[in-house]
Amino acid sequence: MEKLMQYIWQHRLYRNSDMVTNDGLKVRVIDPGLLNTDAGPDFFNAKIEIDGHLWAGNVELHVRATDWKRHGHDRDKAYDSVILHVVGKDDAPVYRTSGERIPQVVLEVSPLFNQSYDRLVNARDEIPCAASLRQVPHLTITEWVEALAFERLHNKVERIGQLLELYHGSWEDVCYVTLARNLGFGINNEAFERLARRTPLRLLAKHSDSLLQVEALLFGQAGLLDAAAQGTDSYYQHLCSEYAFLANKFQLQPMERESWKLFRIRPQNFPYRRIAMLAHYIEGGFSLMSKLLEADGEKALRDLFTVELTGYWANHYSFGKPNARPSRALSDNSIDIVLINTVAPLYCACGEITGESRLADKAIALLESLKSERNAIVDKFTYAGIDSPDALTSQALIELKREYCEARKCIYCKIGHYLLSEAARSKT
């Protein structure tokens, strides 16, 4: 509740523009101050006119005035700088450590504001403001969507920066882990990243001249091989024997087979072919990051991920019975997802870290050139009134849904802020 009060105070959404303290002094807020996210009073450097006198100092907010004493502020000299105590309920006067009384006002808001806030945070709809979105100006939505797109991309860049530090500046290692993670396509992301971290490039590089050994290492480390399995084909048995030798040689420990999710997944999306695709890039030496940086345009990037698997995986979705309809390792839509979640963030991160701004521009241009993702999140926003013409927008909508709507952080969302501001200005 105090967070909401801070929000109301910070954005001047209170109803009583002509405030009066509990002892009858007129109050005018010139500057609400700067929100403090650390210990100490809630707002620093506020400017408040009280009974015609200008005061500069800090402001503290509480749901009840008695919280002042309950929190120990009456014994804490850090709160002696408070020039105004703002409360939801005035149930006691408050004092500094010296015994001097602090001016206190009750924060009043429009009943419509409270109703709007309750509707948003308690809405059953996955998008709390879905019924009100069309009331929000197009410019407000456009600016917020653009900001969210960069917010989501920046979060991915931060993750890549952490990987770069972990791998001591090796972009190929970072590219390998990032690609592996995104080959999980959401449902198996964590499992693929664990596989890549557990099977580092330096190990795979020692055997990159043998596709069978690379596949044995990846499938074995994934926990998808069982030498005791009955009725398996010769390829599978070769993988098992190769992995047993390599695991003993390098003291390897496989993942748990249960790490992988296969339930309700189409066969073409099984992790087996994704792992085989990863092995394809490692055979002969992994150099995908270099190829991404050299690629000129979307077509060149697509060509890098238009992979036709050979040998066993040319006509298998998993171990066992062959499939009568061999297919590419990734469909066009799957390539789009890889470009969105792997290539664009790598470009942006590399541009920011190396200072090559053209790469960051290249990342944005790529996202703008790709068609919008089609998923449940994007469809819900489209139905509510926000169109998604490209991948940059669909990424923004995913960020909005996951980081704001699901967390009901409506007061931190520009759309929610607009709706609450309009409600606060209501005279009813």
Image (cartoon, helix red, strand yellow):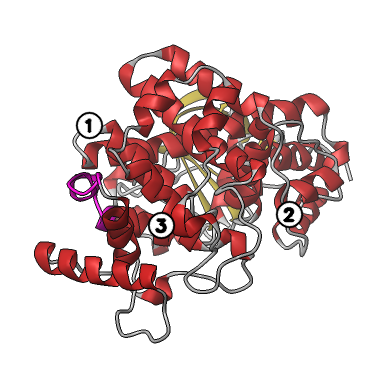
Q: Which residues are magenta?
A: 197-209
Q: Amino acid at mark 1?
A: Gly
Q: Earlier in the sequence, mark 1 or mark 3?
A: 1
- Kindly indicate the quadrant of the structure image that contains residue 224: bottom left
- Kindly indicate the quadrant of the structure image that contains residue 350: top left
| Label number found at residue 200 | none
Labels 1, 3: front one: 3
317 within the magenta span:
no
Density class for disc 2 (Cα within 10 Å; few <14, some 14-19, many ≥20) is few
Q: Position of residue 297 (x, y in %)?
A: 56, 19
- Which residue is found at the position 35% from the left and 49% from the top? 99
- Look at the picture and state if 366 lies above or below 332: above
Residue where numbered disc 3 is placed: 192
Question: How many numbered badges does the structure rendering display?
Answer: 3
Q: Earlier in the sequence, mark 2 or mark 3?
A: 3
Q: Position of residue 310 (x, y in %)?
A: 47, 50
Density class for disc 1 (Cα within 10 Å; few <14, some 14-19, many ≥20) is few
Residue where numbered disc 1 is placed: 169
Residues at marks 1 and 3, CA–CA distance in whole angstroms: 21 Å
Query: Element under label 1?
Result: loop
* Residue nearest the observer in this picture, 35 or 317: 317
Residue where numbered disc 2 is placed: 376
Q: Earlier in the sequence, mark 1 or mark 2?
A: 1
Cβ–Cβ below 8 Å for labels 1 and 2? no
Q: Is residue 211 left or right of residue 125?
A: left
